[in-house]
Amino acid sequence: MIVREYDLQDTDRLYEILCSSLDQSFGREMFSYFHLQWPAGQLVACDFSGRPIGFLSASKIDMSHARIMMFAVDRDHRSFGVGSKLLMHLKRVAMMNGIKHISLEVRPTNMRAINFYQRHGFTATEVLRTYYTDGGDAVRMDHIAQLNI
């Protein structure tokens, strides 16, 4: 598996993964919107044939803060380290861009995702009431890079 930056030709496959994975509705145009906003934060995991099997889309909030906007792995490729590899790649990209704070929102009922993020150094910091379009709550999770001196 390789991780690379998003390419416009990935859109149809990534949208297919998005629609089958997330319960929040996003338009196909979000991929190009986030790419224009921060190209380095748009990551695609591909199998060895080059077919996208997952993606992570992050937005640069300011010079030190990025936010994960969309993150999904094809159902057939979950539990094989695809998500971990995408997240570790984002952390490296963030560090190289001077970003020390990464945040995201997740449904409090999505314990699999919450546990995944906690294993990767994220901490639940806030409950956001009626955050999602269906009125559901969200948990904000934050990762702050620590300097090892």
Image (tube, helix red, strand yellow):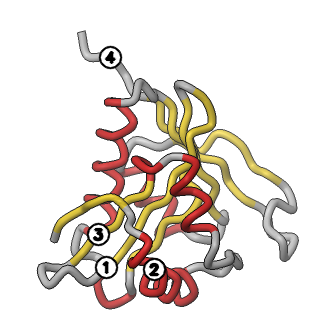
* Residue at image mark 4: 147
* Residue at image mark 3: 45
Residue placed most toward the observer, 115 or 19: 19
Nearer-N-terminus badge (4/3): 3
134 with respect to 149 (left or right): right
Q: Amino acid at mark 1?
A: Pro
Q: Which mark is residue 30?
A: none
* Mark 3 element type: strand
* Mark 4 element type: loop
* Callout 1 crowding tier (Cα within 10 Å): few <14, some 14–19, many ≥20: many
Q: Which mark is residue 52?
A: 1
Report the quarter where the N terminus lies. bottom left
Residue at the image position 14 percent from the left and 84 percent from the top = 49
* Residue at image mark 2: 14
Nearer-N-terminus badge (4/2): 2
Residue placed most toward the observer, 56 or 122: 56
* Mark 2 element type: helix
- Badge 2 vs badge 1, beta-carbon distance below 8 Å: yes
